[in-house]
Image (cartoon, rainbow, N blue to C red):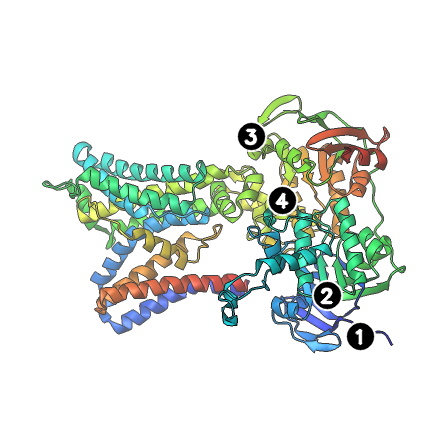
Amino acid sequence: MRRDFLVGQIPLVTLIVLGVVIAILTPRFLSPLNLSNVLVQAAVITVIAIGMTFVIIGGGFDLSVGSIVALSGCVCAMVMMEAGIAAGVAAGVAVGALVGLANGLIVTVLKVNPFITTLGTMVLVRGVVFLLTGSQQVPIDQPLPQPFIDFGIERFLGIHYLVWLPVALLFALSWVLARTPYGRSVYATGGNREAAYLSGIRVDRVVASTYVWCGGLAGLAGVMLASRLQSGQPTAGEFYELTAIAAVVLGGASLYGGEGKLYKSVIGVFIMVILGNGLNLLNVDSYWQRVAIGAVIILAAAADRLRAHRA
Amino acid sequence: MPATPVLAAEDLSKRFVAINALDHVNFELAAGEVHALVGENGAGKSTLIKVFGGIHRPDAGRVLVDGAEVELHSPADAYAKGIALIGQELRVVPALSVAENVMLGHLPTRPLVPGIAASAALRLDRARMRAAAGAALAQLNLTVDLDQRVDRLTFAERQSVAIARALSRNARVLVLDEPTAALEEREVHSLFAVIEALKAAGVAILYVSHRLDEIVAIADRCTVMRDGRVAADLARGAFSAAELARHMTGRDIEREHAHGAAAPGETLLEADLGGEVRLRAHEVVGLAGLLGSGTSELLRRLFGAAGGARLRVRGRALDTRHPAESIAAGIGMVPNERILGLVLDQTVRDNIVLPNLGRFGTWWRMDDAAAGRVVRELLVALDVRPPDPDAVVRRLSGGNQQKVILAKWLAARIEVLLLDEPTQGIDVAAKAQIHRLMREFAGRGGAVLFASSELDEVLGQSDAVLAMRRQAISARVARGAGLTEHAVREAITFHR
């Protein structure tokens, strides 16, 4: 029991060691400006990773989140210019949730493999974004409403609103997963789909719902990014899906489903973001950064396998 | 002086975390002998055969083959020493042919370039492969198309393929782990014929089974294990089923039989699925049928897990299309494989709560304290060991896992309990407990329908029997109204 607990803390220990090493190598890491940058960068990925954790616990996989970020950012900006801030934000989140619903239905009703399904929607949605925007940023000539832009800049208690949002989501959705009947059904479905079905869980609905969470949260991340970039960018969110999946796996969620915790995925996000940030500060060549990050992902997955073996 | 045993264990010990799985075990297996190994779940049988199979390494003690100490580091090592383990999950490759499966691991080759021996690894010698595979299968009296894909075969045929593979590699010790668990009676007889033939050919057979009557029928010698130790080592003639059960549990188990309990009450469930099904309160109904006769399908349909079914529950029509609907109407099902009933990596509590998510707390907050109380009570009542709601189900023994599945439904508000082979592969004591729980459930006014391919069990536990043959109900006989072994056997057997 105690060893299980210790093994479960490996991601946190990795994060702390990583932070300490980078702080020693480059004092700039701990400067308030840099730390606030790290937090804001992590904020957007965290929102995506939370949704991804839902899908992965439920036994699925979602590659389309990066494209959803771009779609929702652009749709949000377009609607906002016509119908105001609230409508824009709602449209951004809703369009993400809709893509998620489509993913969920394709996976459960048509029984297409999640990897292929979301690979398809990833490419398809990105195409739609370019068609919708004519591959131009949105809006082109006039700025987005000031309060929306302020949201991306201003702080509460010295910390960006953009950072408070995922903090609130983390608490609320951790409750949903751990303490509600719905959350239990997500874990059970991912852990053993047939057993969950024979226990009366509507497994198809549960699986589809995880994709809706993931799409909706990616939509929200797109809105947050639009606020920070002060525009909808059709090229936004590229490779976000990979970062988010890597973060969730680094946090110890099982790609076979049934296992994972939101706060651990957030630790995974910080490992990814701080690693990237530290390599930047150390002026490591960007190609070498990719090599390093790729290696870290494989190491994390290998460590996970090793852990599963021993248990 | 007796001949050197072909396989022996000397003072073998193996510890897992806190359990002595093997505690100074001594064991001998002679050539041409069928040596049975019995014991309750967790008694150490599997650990012992896994040591012989090179899967586990002992902490202390020696394994001897032909009197010489060997170290078995892997299944390949065991194979090389002539020890072959045939488990419940057969190691056959579904997409390969029968011949390829038999010869897997030592496929014959011939040079790709004639005359250059080094090119041999590149080309399969199909003719030799088929000949060798055919010879091995002939020893087992199995006539199947050598080129047929293995996933087209029945379980019994796949089992023969696995045994043939062992023979083709000159195995001298065959370890059979619960070989009859998934076989029909007819197939059991042909397996026994094969075992007799192998025995005559000098192969030593280590036979692990829960079915004590089989062991009495076939074993020359029987080792009984209890709590990691050898509790008895008996020669043929010195053991009966009752004697073995006594050694396994360390106490006498009376063979409990259902006796005409309370008169059946009102009808709880009716359906017409290839014959009439009617289950009444206070009644335990056995569902008899050979493998493939459709008993599992019938139960799944009643539970809404195999397409739609029209039922009448307490007289009210119910068109069930999903287990959730059946559960809401008061029907629960224990599936025929434990893996279908449990989320193995979750805790006992999570598993028991699963069909009852709506019952403990509200949609936004589970009442874990209330669930914990119910779960703890059930664990004690069902004698689950350890009675720990936070134990991970994967670490429990088979019998305890089966009790957890039952607990799921006892925690739910159900009136009709469907069980598919509820005692398959679990030990005698756990089996008796499951039977008792079924009767208690009926005693409290519930209706029980349980499928079993063991005729003894059906006859012993049922107030009435539904017999199935070729996907249809062929007879219904009640205790006191023609329920005899002969009647049930007639009803389940297919006559041309």
Foreground: disc 2 or disc 3 = 2
Q: Nearer the viewer, residue B113 or A44?
A: B113
- Chain letter belonging to callout 2: B
Indicate which disc residue B4 carries.
Answer: 1
- Earlier-in-chain disc, 3 versus 4: 3
Q: Position of residue B253 (x, y in %)?
A: 83, 51
Q: Would you name the residue on which mark 3 appears?
A: B321
Asked whether the beta carbons under mark 3 and mark 4 sit within 8 Å of each other, the answer is no
Asked whether the beta carbons under mark 1 and mark 2 sit within 8 Å of each other, the answer is no
Foreground: disc 3 or disc 4 = 3
Q: CA distance from mark 3 to mark 4?
A: 29 Å
Element marked by disc 2: strand
Evaluate whether label 4 is on the same chain as label 2. yes
Q: From what the image shows, is residue A102 above or below residue A34?
A: above
Name the amino acid, label 3. Arg
Q: Would you name the residue on which mark 4 appears?
A: B374
Q: CA distance from mark 4 to mark 2?
A: 48 Å
Name the amino acid, label 4. Val
Q: CA distance from mark 1 to mark 3?
A: 62 Å
Q: CA distance from mark 1 to mark 2?
A: 14 Å
Asked whether the beta carbons under mark 4 and mark 2 sit within 8 Å of each other, the answer is no
Q: CA distance from mark 2 to mark 3?
A: 49 Å
